[in-house]
Image (spheres, rainbow, N blue to C red):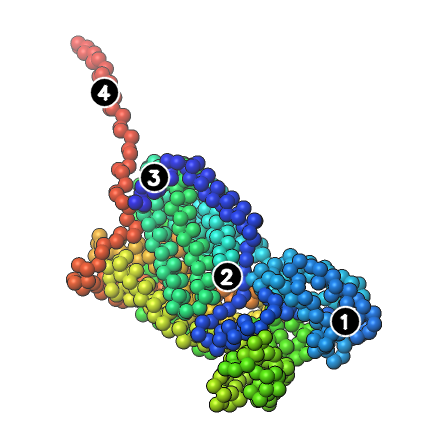
Amino acid sequence: MFVSVGRWCARRPKRTIAAWLLLLLALGAAVALCGRVTSEAVSIPGSDSQAAADAARAFPGSASGKQPLVLHTGADGADLTSAGARDAVAAAARNIAGVDHVVAVTTPYEGAGRAAMSADGHTAFLSVELDVTDRDITPEVTRRIVDAARPAEAAGIEVTPGGSLAAAADKGSTRHSEIIGLLAALAILWFGFRSAVAATVPLIAAVVGLGVSLSVVGLLGHLMDMPSAGSTIAAMIGLGVGVDYSLFCLTRFRELLGDGASVEDAAALTTAASGKAVAFAGCAVVAALASLALGGLPLLHALALAPGIAVLVAVAATLTLLPALFALLGRSLAPTPTIPDPTAPDAAAPDAEVRDQVAAGGAGWRRVAERVARQPWRHLIGALLLVAVLAAPAVGLTFGQLDGGDKVSSTASRTAYDRLASAFGPGVNGPLQVTNALPDPASGPTDPRVAKVTDALTDTSGVAAVGPPQLSPDGRTARWQVTPTTAPGDPETARLVHRLRETTLPAATAGTGHGAHVSGAPAAQLDLNDRLSRRMPAIIAFVLVIAALLLLLAFRSVVVAATAAVLNLVSVAAAYGVLTALFQQGLGAGALGLDGPVPIPGYVPLLMFAVLFGLSMDYEVFLLSAVREPYLKSGDHCGSVITGLARTGGIITSAALIMVCVFLSYLLSDDPVVKMFGIGLATAVALDATLVRGLLVPAAMILLGKANWWLPGWLDRALPRIDIEGGDHEPPPRTVPAPAPEAAPAPAPPVTVRKT
């Protein structure tokens, strides 16, 4: 099948390329017409916070709730309670009320908004209600609201959006990161191929695939809650694997051209061999991402779906678009032949194995492999010790909650957060909602069942303020807003949530036949992290089993499958350690553009684990295939490991270097979560391609010897035979020009005999 797909696309290159471009244009037009939609909403089925959120639907209100627009004057500025400031704010509020999607604006001078004025009169906020949900608040909506507040700005009042308005305003494009990643990849590819045409081909395939996948992810936001991090992760993974997959295939294509194959045959055979390996590796990534479905959370489904789409599109582009590009560019992609010096003493042509190693830059990796073979225990123990040092901080890894205070200081979210925290206390940035569904309607706020809960909440330690109870129109649901004394991401706020759920509310509602629930951003994040902590062992076990089964099918060896699956944990553990040290402990936070330590959300390590395990399968398959081939021919396990590493070390490190550059380019983002993924993925890929594939795997295979390829007879008969790197048929014999017919021997000169 693969050879047929490759040959069909190679024979119709213009038609294939046109189909991809039409698809890209159609999806781009759909995005331009419908827009990209993201949502940071988190639903946690079966949790206490979800129960509270569901009960709160009994209350009428705007689709997005009340969004703050922060007003601030300096210490030497006019008081916001002055007549001039009141008039300016009132004029701004009237303008904002006329903006599309705004349904109500509450000023701090009204009875319902008096709590929005600070004690010193220098900070306040307008409460803006919209008819769209948080996911539909775009940067354009925020800009129009801020522009409408110009009367306040003209009076010397600083206006900063907060809440979802700030989140929309802070949505920055990652295009600069993608451009930097592409330029770095171009430099690496040119250095490897020494050909501008060859270096450009993987980038073309990657960029087209990236455009298609990001458009699909953007449109999916209309159908499901897709966090903004989903598109960013899809771009990181899609660009990285797109270039890597194309690089593997381009290397094989150039080798076939160098061996004398025609352009069409080389394109078809590349798809049949390397293309099949790419499809296997892509399916491994998707299978690892599918494990996140065990988390039972819509957030994880979205975060797994986005990069999964990017990987599948990259595989499709590699199998179809790439052969078309090969056919169109033809011999311009062929390696430059090297003409040997006929006078040199070693002018004889090297054998195929040596030629392959030199072409792949394998001389250096052969020396590394030989040193590992001479002292496998030393290299194995040394590499494990290095990993242990890097992974040590991961022992203290805890899941936390990011809030506006963790954003970069130049963002609207951070400015609004700091001003509100300074004026009203840190808890105002993450209020809790307590909801109580009553069996019978309440008579009012003074109903004994309602008043008892109000008093209990007020007396709870860690509570700064409790708003007056609100009753739903039918009187069957009561709601309180509770302001903690600590910030949303502070561990004390999480302890307050536990205290309310386990002590305060059960005691206040005992014997009444009803119970209260706690929601709000801190409570929802706490429930999310608790759910992830419980499900993480099952997800890790699932990924390990899937990885081992895929390797077992590919290489028909129990030992190789088990060893590779376990060693894949090494790079992940080291990445977790680096992540913990840099972000949670704050080591080098300034170099990352952060003001100090920031908590790590639970979904970051979990998603990283699934992605990294899938990506490491690519390098594992490439290395083990190169080891297994010479072993089946010679039976020399040590020599086959040396040969395999010599043949693949250069291409693996080049591919990894490209991916590392792509991931590190995302450190330019202001979002701490994006920085976490960039650092974590780059660290793991770099270690996986060097320490794990260059030292640990060869050392382990040399120590295990022939046991590497052990497979019980009954399992050998039961397993289907899959050749992930073999073509659908053997390549045609190389065409060698027929030798010219020998010229007839010249006639002997006549012999003259003289008589003496």
Dot 4 or dot 3: first in sequence order is 3
In the image: residue 342, left or right of residue 189: left
Q: Nearer the viewer, mark 3 or mark 2?
A: 2
Q: CA distance from mark 3 to mark 2?
A: 38 Å
Q: Count up the numbered dots.
A: 4
Q: CA distance from mark 1 to mark 3?
A: 69 Å
- Please name the residue that numbered disc 4 is placed on: 745
Residue 394 in picture, x, y percent from top left: 45, 75
Q: Residue 7: which numbered mark, if any?
A: 3
Determine contact: label 1, label 3, CB under 8 Å.
Answer: no
Quadrant position of residue 114:
bottom right
Residue 325 position (above or below residue 596): above
Amino acid type at mark 2: Met
Density class for disc 1 (Cα within 10 Å; few <14, some 14-19, many ≥20) is: many
Residue at image point 40% right, 76% down: 534
Q: Residue 73: which numbered mark, if any?
A: 1
- Please name the residue that numbered disc 2 is placed on: 226
